[in-house]
Structures are given as structure tokens and as C-alpha cells.
Image (cartoon, grey):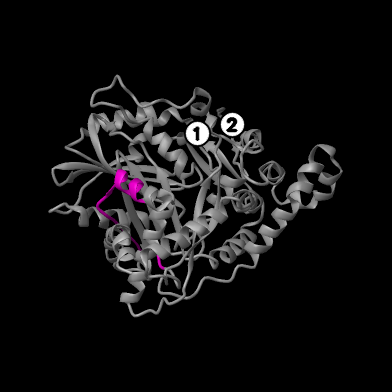
Amino acid sequence: MTNETERMSAVDAAWLRMDRPTNLMMIVGVILFDGHVNFARFRRTIEERFLKFPRFRWRTNQDAMTASWEADPDFDLDQHVRKIALPRPAGQAELEALVSHLAGSDLDRRRPMWQFHFVENFGADSAVILRIHHCYADGTAMIRVFLTLTDLQAEPGAQAPDPEPEASARAAGDDETLAWLGRLNVPGAGLVQKAVAEGAQWFAKAADLTRNPEHASELAKHVLGIAAELSRVATLADDPPTRFKGELGARKIAAWTESLPLDEVKAVARALGCTVNDLLMSTVAGALGAYLRDHGEDTSGKTIRATVPVNLRDPKAAASLGNHFGLVFLELPIGIRDPLERLFAVHAAMTALKSSYQPVLTLGLMAALGMLPNSAQSAAIDLLSTKATLVATNVPGPSHPMYLAGRRISRMIFWVPQSGDIGLGISILSYAGQVQFGLIADYKRIPDPAAVTARFHDEFEKVVLSLLLGPYLMNGR
């Protein structure tokens, strides 16, 4: 990293320019601790470990067509690591209200766009709320960055593995993306290298690509698949009207659940011949459908779509910053009430997407959008957001307990932003043998998110009960 201004990658620039007053492009996370954390020690940890990534000392600069990084000449850590108090008594409801307020409040664009809010009085414990703009990194990268702040025990000496020195020194840009994208085991990945490198200009150069013997066979192999996928995404019908879709406001509401034992989730998924992700997303579909029916909506035969990020990051650069993921549109059959029938429908939809060109296609499109004028990018995002109702993420965290600033982390929750006119986000994170659900929604769409999160456990238990009763019902026939 030099002291000069640095061009922002096209994909990161697209995320920077996607902000709207009704949908800020912030990743928001909550870390809960067992016991009280010393603030001075926490601040020192951020200074020594988080700022090892020079990108976090840099702010953004943009105009209608371009975006870049520049060093903040007046960087002040105290503007980014701040104490905040909850009204007493300080429990989950009060913390959720604070997270909700911060999720709807913009970051200071004159400075690097990230903050840690240190909450001393969360009952007898401490909590930390992290906000960071999506242009700095995607969720997978932020989990890895966060792990560099942690230790395997209360006192230093057994720190979580550091990222590679090269990854710590700088963010991964378009050139690094090209270095590994062709090695991905994803349909069309090699061809999409050109789209990521050249953005919108790639389409105009397709004829030149066909004349290049090095790329001709790749083009011939994948052109029909990519064209078919592009056509399918472009012609997807708009998601059906529900109370989840409609006008958005600036107020956001966040909520989270008690966790589920990961071993139990794995056992149920294994018994039913599906993946953990299939099972969890089916649980989400069941909860959303039940919530709509309780509010008088008919969900019969209805399916809504979730945009689901797919990690396209090179494992060798797992801790590098930047955004390296594609998106798929996952069908969620909210109208199917039978838990096993719904699960198998989600499993079938997931299986079909595994051989889809959608992830690399959307990554290439994001690169192209990052090179277009703001008005064109905004119009494209509006079009895509009509095709889905929510954003859903499932990120694996550490399998064992971690310590930060001398205290054990008891739980972690996070939310990724929603783009365009999407007003609902659901996150799933596994940590230390537990699965944690989180929900964030626009207040105009879901004023009572706890009424949704409370159903996640119920829907999972329905799957378990159906699994246990299956042999009994079969024998009774």
C-alpha cells in the first residue's frame, strides 16, 4: 500500500455507489461476551490487529464514474472505537433497539467507513457492535478478519491463525481475482475472467475473444450456458406481492434468536439426505410463510426468492479484503406447509443452482455495473431487486470458542445489507457448535421481527417431529 490514491476495484465500486437512504450498504455485526471486557484492552487489540490491514486507514472518494481509495490524513482511532451505553435495564431488547438504530444510521464518509461501538453495560456482560461499509469487504472476508482479533484462550499466546502476510498488506483487487477465477470448479469461471477484468467493455469485445485461440474453446464450451443463464435471470418474473415487499423507509429493525445445536442440525440433515444449508433455508421459508398467514395473507402455491451469496474467493487469499462473491436466486416455497415436502423442494432448488452459471454471471455483472454511471447502475439494481424478496446468508464461523480482549465470545450475529428495494435480510452463522439466526427488516415491512425469529425454532422442531413420526405413520398405513 502506498500513500498515493488507489483505484477501487470495479466490484467494490459498485457496492460503494449502491447506498440509498432506505438501504445503506453496511455489514452490521454483534459480538456478545461472557463477562465484562476492559475497554482499554479492547481498543489496544483493534489498534494492534485490526489496523494491520492498511485498508482500514483509508477512506473512499468517488464521482459519477469512478471510485478510489485514499489515505485519511487525519485518521483518529477514537472516531472508530467508541463507548456507548444502553438504557437500564440493559437486556436483549435494549441491545436490539441500539443495533436497529445504528443499522439505519449512515457512516461518516469523510473518514474510513467502519466503527466498533463498545457496549459496557449489557447486563453483567459486554457487547460490541461492528459497522463497516460493504465496499471494504464481503461477509466471508470480514469473518476471517475478525478472527485475527481473537485468541484461542483468555490470555494471548494462542492467537487464531493470522492471514497470509501478502493478504494482510493490501486488499485483493481485480488482478488477483483473475489469477484464481479460472481455477474455480464453477461453470464458465474461466470465461468470466474477461468480464471481471473489463466490465461493460467485455461485451463489445466478444468478437475479438472468439478470434483468440486461447479463449475460443472456452467460449464455445460455455457461451450457450451463460447466454441461457443471462436470459433466465433477465426474464425472471417479479416476486409475488406480500407484506415483505413495498415502500421502504430509513428505520431498520434487528432481532435474533436463541441458537440451535449444530450437531443436532447436522444429524437431522444427514438423516434426510440433504445439506445443513437446505435444512436451514427450509426453516427460514417455513417461518416466513407462517408469519404471512398469521397476518391474513394467503400463501397457497406461493414461492418467493432469496438472493444468496456464493463465495468465489480463492482459499489462498481467504483473508484478503474486497468483494469476491456471486449471487444466486433461490426459490423459497413459503406456501408449502408440510415441513418435509418443503425441505425437499428447497433441496431440489439448491441442487439445480449448484450447476448454475449464476454466481460467476452476477460477479461479472457487478464488475460491469461498477464501471457504469450511477444512474445506469441504480436502474439495473432496481430491476434485479424486483426479482427477490430477501437476502439470505449462511456463513460458517469458528467451530471452537474464541476469546477477544481476554473474554470468551459467547455469541456472534451479523447482517449483510439489502440492495435496491429489498427490505428483509436473514443471516445464519455457526459458531462454537451453535447455529445463530438473525433478521433485519425495514420497519414499514416488518415492524415486529421477533415474531418471525421466534418461528425459526418452531419450524426446525416440526422437521424433527416429522422425521421421528415418519416410520410410525408409514407403519400405520
The residue lying toward the viewer, choosing from 251 and 309, is 309
- Mark 2 belongs to which amino acid? Glu
Question: 244 or 341, which lies in front?
Answer: 341
- Relative height, residue 49 to residue 311 (above, below): above
Q: Is residue 181 left or right of residue 167?
A: right
The foreground one among 199 and 279 is 279
Position of residue 149 relative to residue 202, above or below, is above
Q: What x and y, as percent, mark residue 315?
A: 52, 33
| Vertical side of 315 occupied by 416: above or below | below
Counting residues from the N terminus, which is met first, the one under dot 2 or under dot 1?
A: 2
User: If the image is split into quadrants, where does the N terminus sit?
Assistant: top right
Give the crowd class for mark 2: few <14, some 14-19, many >=20 residues within 10 Å: few
> Where residue 5 appears, x then y in whole percent?
59, 35
Q: Is residue 251 magenta?
A: yes
Secondary structure found at label 2: loop
The residue depicted at 45 percent of the width and 36 percent of the height is: 56
Image quadrant in which you'd find residue 450 = bottom left
Q: Which mark is residue 111?
A: none
Task: Find disc 1 in the rendering and name its residue.
Answer: 318
Give the quarter of the figure containing the C terminus.
Answer: bottom left
Q: Nearer the viewer, mark 2 or mark 1?
A: 1
Q: Is residue 120 magenta?
A: no
Determine if residue 118 is in view.
no
How far, Cα to Cα, is label 2 from label 1?
26 Å
Looking at the rendering, which quadrant does residue 249 occupy? bottom left
- Residue 458 at what x, y percent from top left? 27, 62
In the rendering, which numbered label is found on residue 4?
Answer: 2
Q: Which range is magenta? A: 249-268
